[in-house]
Image (cartoon, rainbow, N blue to C red):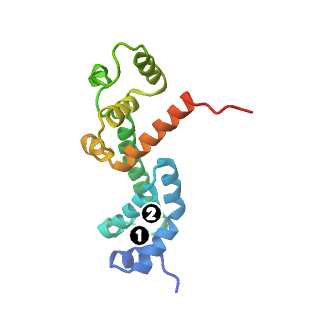
Amino acid sequence: MNYTLFDLFLNAYNGNSFAQLQIVQRFQPLLKKYAALLKYEDAYSDLQLYLLELLHSGKLTKLQRKDDGTLVKYIESSIRHQYISLNSRKNAVDNSVIASVDEIDFDQMSLSSNDEYPELLISDLHSVLQPSELTLLSQFVFKGMSIADIAEKSGVSRQAINRKKLSILKKLECAFFPKTSK
């Protein structure tokens, strides 16, 4: 039996898990496209969840035209808008400064004040890292805050903070320990 897309949506709306699976599979290329553009770990799952929430919201049953083209276009634009929303949220996390670099009290760090090395280290860090990365590094290394505490304070997920920490460590490794070619 050949179901139209609207029939699948109605069945999915009424709780038919097979119809839900069919719809997710039908829109899988679109979900994968936007998940790849988002470039974070759970992007595909977030978009899949959004599609299922859209199915259960009943908004699709209220469309005036019920043909496949209208439904596909509506789903595509809804997923694109969700991508924009998730992307702006992700960018806000990436660009947010957990604490201003000006608030970092470098004098309170447990480094010797008579030694010139800390000033060199800090200036090197400034040249390699962005202000938000420097802030995260200071909170994690110098202030001893845990990833969970930093995430809670900044209002983002632990995964996002951990990813940012790993990218900082990779930047520092490339800057201070370049691989020697033999």
Q: Is residue 171 left or right of residue 138?
A: right
Query: Which residue is tagged 1?
Result: 66
The residue carrying pointer 2 sits among few (fewer than 14), some (14 to 19) or many (20 or more) residues within 10 Å by Cα, namely some
Residue at position x 32%, y 24% from top? 101
Task: Judge by depth and name the residue closer to the eye, 172 or 131.
Answer: 172
Q: In the displayed structure, would residue 134 be above or below residue 152? A: above
Task: Judge by depth and name the residue closer to the eye, 46 or 28.
Answer: 46
Can you name the residue that lies furthest to the bottom here?
1
Q: In the displayed structure, would residue 102 be above or below residue 179? A: above
Amino acid type at image mark 2:
Thr
Q: Are marks 2 and 1 in contact (CB under 8 Å)?
A: yes
Disc marking residue 70: 2
Task: Judge by depth and name the residue closer to the eye, 89 or 80.
Answer: 89
Q: Secondary structure at mark 1?
A: loop
Q: Which corner quadrant holds the C terminus?
A: top right
CA–CA distance in space, label 2 to label 1? 7 Å
Q: Is residue 151 left or right of residue 180?
A: left
Disc marking residue 167: none
Q: Secondary structure at mark 2?
A: helix
Residue at position x 30%, y 66% from top? 57
Q: Is residue 62 left or right of residue 68?
A: left
Amino acid type at image mark 1:
Lys
Residue 44 screen position, x and y as percent? 46, 58
Residue 170 screen position, x and y as percent? 52, 38
Residue at position x 33%, y 15% from top? 113
Can you name the residue that lies furthest to the left here?
153
